Every structure is written in C-alpha cells, then in structure tokens.
Amino acid sequence: MAVTWTLVEPCCGTAALTMHLLGARKQLVPRQGSKWFLRRELASLVQRLGFMGAPSRVILSDASPWARVVQQVLRLDRSHLLAELGRLVAAGERDPRMLHDLLHGARVPSNPTCMAARLLWLQRMAYAGKAVGVVEGRWSSPGLNPTSAYGVAATERFGEVRPLGAALLKVVNAAPTFLGIEAEVGLARPHQGTAPTLVYLDPPYLGVTGYTGAELGRDQVVELAQAWARAGAVVVVSEATAVQQAGWHAAPIGSVTQADLLFRARHRTEWVTWRGGLQLELFGRAA
C-alpha cells in the first residue's frame, strides 16, 4: 500500500527536491542556489526520516513566481505551455539579444502559461545561472549568457555547443506530470496537515548574495521552521552552516559542486538541520 504524505517547499525556487521525488531526470533550468546536485542526498534523508516514495500532495511557494511555473510544468496537459515556450525559443534562435531585452523589464504576464514560458526562457538564458527576479511586477534579468543563447562553434578540443532553447523544450516536455500540487507566491504558512508532512526549507543563505525581491533573514527562517514543527511537520532546513536550535539535529550533507562554485567565493560544505521523523543519524555524522 502506497504511503500518503505531503511535501511542502516554502522557498521552492525551481523545486529541485520535488521534481526529483516525482521522477524528473533533469533539472528544469540551472539557477543560483539550486539543490539539484544534492537531490539524491536530500532524498536519502527524506527516506531516513520516514517518508517513502513520492509525495501524494505537494505545496510549493516562493517569493518569485517559480511555484506557479513548476505547477504549469507538471500539468497533465502542458501543450499550451510547450507551444508558448516554442514560440519564445524560435524567436530566441533568430535574435536572442533582442528577445532578452524585450522581456527584461517587461511586466510579468497575468496569464500563467505565458508567465511560465517567459520565466523558463529567461532563466535558461540567464548569465551564469543567476536568478531571474521580479521587481515591482517586472522581470529583472541578471543578463544574457552568450553560450546559452548563441552556442559555441566546435574547436579542436571541444565539440559544438548549440543554443540551449531546444534543450529547454525537451526538458519541459519530458518532465513528470502530477495532479496533487498547490502553488502560491509568498511563504506557505504553517498549518496542521491531514497526512504526515515534511517541510523542506531552502532559504537564501546567510551571508551570501540573495535573490531579487526575496528577503528572509536567519531569525525568520528559524521562526518559520519552529512554527512548522509545532504544527506537527517534520522540518528540514538547508544552509551553508548548521542552524543551532535545541532539540534539532544537524549534519553535513555534501560538498558544493563545481556548478555552485560559480556563485560562491570558496569551496564549503552544505548542511541540513532537521527536527522530527525517525531522528536517524545522517551518514553516521549527525551532530
């Protein structure tokens, strides 16, 4: 009999953990701070805390529109999203700079399909994978990545790199589908669940560059995590250092990947802090 449980990601970003647990083979788009490269270790922790298999319900939220983007990607019928994204990819292949400059600073569309397609394209083309944000209802792009947008010709040492719009279309088309998803802009507020609930909180890290339009200090993170725990959820917090709280467990979960070194000044270990569940030691190194 399948286990019924709920996964909540209050700061979901591109929802790497959710996508992995639902069966995605590739990340939607590279994005600053994504935990895609730690997805297997995070999934192992989820299992050790007593949550087996895929969740039956997912609640996503974020300061940016990413929760609603992921909801659009996971729809049973995403033909409209693929059509809209296909039009953007075609326009980007003709003149990526013109399309980027047209979208950067433009108002975020109210139509969820159009909004999702534009954010997916902008993030796939974003300079160094930095986060595309929203400021006063308008897209804020960190700049265009020439390699993603134009590709690179083959050399004696390396093969050709084609523009990555077509690859984005393939990733979206191959993504899993899932009915039980709720999405909102802003933080998912703590509440009593009707099924076992795991909350995965991956906030902007303390002391590093945050995301445009997203502010969440360490005190707020601790308060939110404790509130979810009081509501009966198992809570896991990702940070660059352990979150020191009495009764909580902490452990290193892996080292920063080469991709993440683009955003960090030095190589350092990721940490998870958690409360609830089976309280098992993670890789035998729980603090």
Image (cartoon, rainbow, N blue to C red):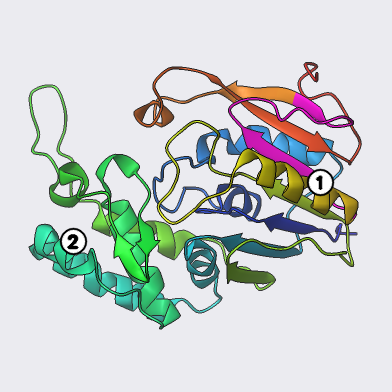
Please give the name of the residue rendered at 63% of the width and 68% of the height, measured from the top-left corner: 178
- Check disc 1 and report the residue beneath it: 226
Where 185 sits versus 34, above or below? below
| Front-lying residue, 282 or 139 | 139
- Check disc 2 and report the residue beneath it: 100
Q: Which amino acid does the dot numbered 1 rest on?
A: Gln
Badge number at residue 24 = none
Q: State the extent of the magenta-drawn residues as a range.
A: 232-250
Q: Which amino acid does the dot numbered 2 rest on?
A: His
| Front-lying residue, 117 or 53 | 117
Nearest to N terminus: mark 1 or mark 2: 2
Circle 1 residues within 10 Å: few <14, some 14–19, many ≥20: some
Report whether 195 appears left or right of 132: right
Picture quarter containing residue 112?
bottom left
Residue 56 at x, y = what percent? 76, 64
Residue 169 shows in this picture:
no
Picture quarter containing residue 221?
top right
